[in-house]
Image (cartoon, coloured by chain):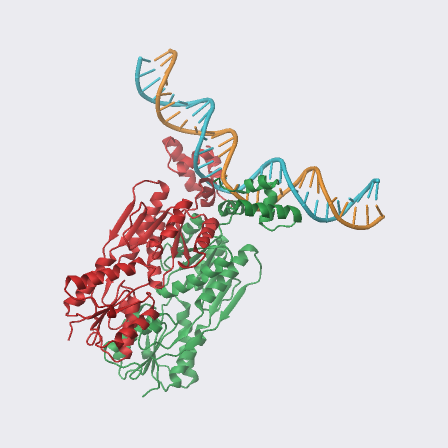
Chain colours: A red, B green, C cyan, D orange
Amino acid sequence: MKKVTINSVASHAGVSKKTVSRVLNNEPNVSAATREKVLKVFKELDYTPNPIARGLAQNRSFIIGCLYDNPSKSYITRVQTGALAACKENNYNLLIHPCELRGDDLINDIEQLLQTSRLDGVVLTPPFGDFEKLANFLKAKKIPYARVASALLEDDSISVRSNDEQGAYEITEHLISLGHKSIAFIKGHPDHSATEQRFKGYRRALASHGIEFDERLVEEGNFSYHSGVDSARSILDLSPRPTAVFASNDYMAAAVLKLATQRQLKVPDDISIAGFDNAPIARHIWPGLTTIAQPVEEMTKQAVTQLISHISQPQEQPYQVTLESRLITRESTAVIK
Amino acid sequence: MKKVTINSVASHAGVSKKTVSRVLNNEPNVSAATREKVLKVFKELDYTPNPIARGLAQNRSFIIGCLYDNPSKSYITRVQTGALAACKENNYNLLIHPCELRGDDLINDIEQLLQTSRLDGVVLTPPFGDFEKLANFLKAKKIPYARVASALLEDDSISVRSNDEQGAYEITEHLISLGHKSIAFIKGHPDHSATEQRFKGYRRALASHGIEFDERLVEEGNFSYHSGVDSARSILDLSPRPTAVFASNDYMAAAVLKLATQRQLKVPDDISIAGFDNAPIARHIWPGLTTIAQPVEEMTKQAVTQLISHISQPQEQPYQVTLESRLITRESTAVIK
DNA sequence: TTGCATTATGACACCGGTGTCAGGATTAGA
DNA sequence: TCTAATCCTGACACCGGTGTCATAATGCAA
């Protein structure tokens, strides 16, 4: 069984390779009869074009790179799911590349990546979506990119964001509506813009309900489960103890729950706990976590879809979209006793 | 800034492209002086070879595909981590491709994948590692592959497996040593060979400690959290209730824990619970799950490393390795009261 | 110094596509 | 029916590497 190439198709169909190429790419200026004939040979020989050769000729690889540096594995999985869906629809492939935002050689690492794999584009997922240094580097290198981010960007790039500020506002308001007035807050990783956004939403909700902001109720976390444990310790040691805790993501919220339970506290009777993201763990533990669900898959899918369409036909107008999140109430929050 | 290609290097160094190619690939028959000269130009021009062109000439893509169909997201993440490590070391890239084992068009899907991306090799992760149909297809297509599996294979392929049977034996023995005699078991997904292995280990432990196997204590799960909930319901409804539950993975064990807690049972006082895999959730919940830790990352890394070396220089001898797992005791298991 | 084996080097085709451009065929308009 | 515009088609170069093979340069023994 010999390899089927554009040449074999051409000779079988009795036309030139260029004509075959035209049919392949749906180019105009091919008579219906010729097109028909070539398509028939495609089927007969079961021909599929060699993407590598095509890539060489067009200087394209049909590969999108997905950059991430995120402590939340489940978040990464969701990002990948969305990116894969977009790639599949467009016959692209997805290359995954974890790397360190704070690494000294991040830029070198990315440069290396670009050189060894000739990516057609890159999708920057949190926290890279808000990391201007990297965006500028890619812009200088003329590598198309799209961002999944949280902050509101004011540039001409492709970006899909979620309204974290609003989500945080809503979940805080939910706690307030249950009668809570002393609500502790655990911040996320300082490199993530979502951290700032969620904190803002928390404060805005307090303010708009006349609750004074108390700095002592705020702990610095970094989105990892471990940081949640540390923060939880400080919060549970406070006296008086807050009646509710809003952690910036579900892993940290789960940590609070674990520590509280270890200390014989009843959740939500003794203390309410809320998270963010609607990670799997939010429903895998008891009590289930009240949280904010974000369309992470959809966000990434849109970003990658736009990226690919931008690669095929670079247009000028930026694509900036904000997707909404929604409150999911479970058993970890209840009316204050 | 013009593009730097092998041609520009050649003209700068005053040699032919072929000689540059020789230096690039560390081929013999280049004089030290010439080699030196070319290497210097590499640096001056900051040259990096174009992998696509190289791929075209050698009919290689320098991409490894990672196939999976696994309900456990954390398992996938670990597999990816290991595969990425091996790829990075060898300047390969990793393409991820989720697909459905039971899908009617699995073979078509994979065929499509191979045609559109010319993978150099494929790593089959559970449950594909034990899926002969796919292995045979790849063999027929002459696509190199490596397997991460559980069953003991008797063929000439590259495969890295873990000793699930032994792990299950040990954790069951651990429960027995705590005084448990009525130990329920939740099976995994029937398509995974690990399911069979773990069940075997469970039975062997019972047998070797003179405990009679009781079919009523066995539930069919599928590794998903949800299936764990269903199984847990049946088990907790048994009368007399087993004093311990061994679930084939941590997600299902977490489900048992959640349901037990919902029903006001104290773990481990009223019932001991053990899992398998040492997934993150095992330490994120309270009480932490006693479980079996498997070197998933290491297994995958070895498999991919071998795969790549096989691609570069196909050798005859198979590579089959079994890695050991180890028992991790946490708070979810205790001496029977 | 000559003769022969060995090493070093380059010319050239090739991998499998796409872009450019020229020229033939067809159609429309006069 | 003739001319001009438009549509089709193919020849050929090119993308940036690698493989083959011929030949030039060198090394070594006689």
Residue B111 in the image: above or below residue B250: above
Query: In the rendering, at what x and y percent does residue B206 appear?
Result: 40, 82
Q: Residue at x 38, y 59 (%)?
A: A69
Q: Quadrant of the C terminus of chain A?
A: bottom left
Residue B126 visible in image: no
How many numbered marks have been drawn onto this rendered protein structure?
0
Q: Residue at x 58, y 59 (%)?
A: B315
Q: Residue at x 24, y 65 (%)?
A: A291
Query: B315 or A231, which is in the foreground?
Result: A231
Query: In the rendering, at what x and y percent does residue A26 appear?
Result: 37, 37
Q: Is residue A221 left or right of residue A165?
A: right
Q: What is the quadrant of residue A295 in the picture?
A: bottom left
Query: A46 or B69, which is in the foreground?
Result: B69
Query: In the rendering, at what x and y percent does residue A40 appear?
Result: 40, 38
Query: In the rendering, at what x and y percent does residue D13 appear?
Result: 52, 32
Residue A102 in the image: above or below residue B293: above
Residue B212 in the image: above or below residue B39: below
Q: Residue at x 34, y 76 (%)?
A: B288
Q: What is the quadrant of residue A182 in the picture?
A: bottom left
Q: Is residue A250 left or right of residue C1?
A: left
Query: A146 or A284, which is in the foreground?
Result: A146
Q: Is residue A199 left or right of residue B22?
A: left
Q: Residue furthest bottom?
A: B337
Query: B72 or A159, which is in the foreground?
Result: A159
Residue A79 visible in image: yes
